[in-house]
Amino acid sequence: MDPSQRLAYHPHMSGPFDSLRRWGARRAERQRRARFAQSVRHLHGPEAPEIPEGEALVITVLLNGAGYLETFLNHYRRMGVRHFAFFDVGSTDDTVARLAAEPGIYVDQSELPLAEHLDLMRTYPAQAYGADRWCLNVEVDELLDFEGRKSIGINGLIRYLEATDATAMAAQTLDLFPKTPLAELPPMSFGEVLDTFLYYDMTTIKRFGYHDPANPLSAYLERNETVEPGIDVLFGGLWAKVFGESRCLTRHPLVFNGPEVQLDAHPNVPTGVRCGDVTGVLKSYRFANLALARSADRPLFSLDARRWTRVELLARAGILTVPDRYRAFFAEAEA
């Protein structure tokens, strides 16, 4: 803490130094946002695309993601996505060229430091292309899954959420990994990773109710409503088991970007939303190319690991929430 901050810091009291510090923080934030706005370049696709109501815009920030694109696009297109907004942060491979060859894709770019501007990079496409539309914000190594995906797809899921007056869906992050120690694996394509990284481990998770005051994210979650009580917010997971650092596994990847929504309130929690009563899973393959994981002094696989087979098993294990009325909804769609 610098001297001015030390002088200003008095619990329950605000003085001139504190006011000056807040003014300085607001000024720095305005400057950060102005620098970012000036840095953005539109590289591909219409600047004002027509995205029909009831469809989702997938938003992804990426760097040198060419090797992921074929599998990533195929996964989301199979569930009915037709519109993708990619924010490139200075790729040096053929990421941008590959994206420009695909239909339904919009590409913007900024080469400002990712760590300092990730929140703005994630929200820029939503504001530029996804106002008053459903936005699905995922990483290029994450694949969304949910019960009934093959029957109703993303558009059917959105119809269900809208029928229950929900404006967001929560999803639990599931880190997948192989039996073989990462250090012994050769470089793989993303398709090969999907065939090899088949296991997950949720034995270290801690659960909090969505509006539990003890929830570490309660300050953000209290600004949201839920369709029904019972949605869990999970912390821990594989990252905590391997590196001892607990992380929030619950995100809100699918959000209707209405005027009352603040998408960048927290990386895991947009505010001003009404969270639906069904949850999905984000299958994450970040350990495939994470140098820290590859150099870990112990393998990821353990006797607690479970093989990924079907999303329905996560609901049976209590990791996902799937209410009866949702099952009835997609069962009717299958009939």
Image (cartoon, helix red, strand yellow):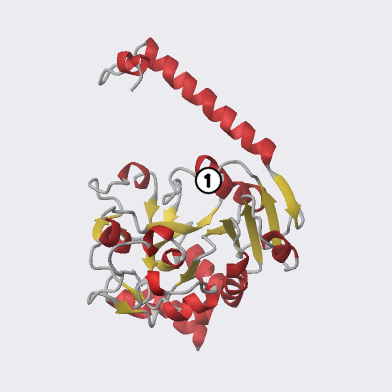
Residue depicted at 58% across the width and 68% down the height: 68
126 w.r.t. 140: above or below = above
Residue 75, compared with residue 16, is above or below; it is: below
Q: Is residue 284 left or right of residue 131?
A: left
Identify whether 291 is placed above or below 152.
above
Provide the residue designation for mark 1: 118
Q: Return the residue nearer the eye: 25 or 14.
A: 25
**Residue 311 position in % (x across, y down):** 39, 77
Which residue is at the far bottom? Answer: 335
- Residue visible at 39% across and 58% down? 292
- Residue 82 lies left or right of residue 242; in this view the side is right
Q: Quadrant of the N terminus?
A: top left
Residue 298: image quadrant is: bottom left
Q: Nearer the viewer, residue 176 or 83?
A: 176
Residue 102's x, y, as percent?
Answer: 72, 68
Kind of residue indicated by mark 1? Leu
Residue in the foreground of this view, choosing between 83 and 274 = 83
- The location of residue 42, given as percent across then percent down, is 73, 49
Left or right, 151 with reference to 281: right
Residue 277 in view here? no
Using the image, determine if residue 92 lies above or below residue 124: below
Query: On the image, which quarter does residue 197 sit in?
Result: bottom left
Residue lying at 60% horizontally and 68% vertically, measured from the top left: 67
Q: Nearer the viewer, residue 81 or 176?
A: 176
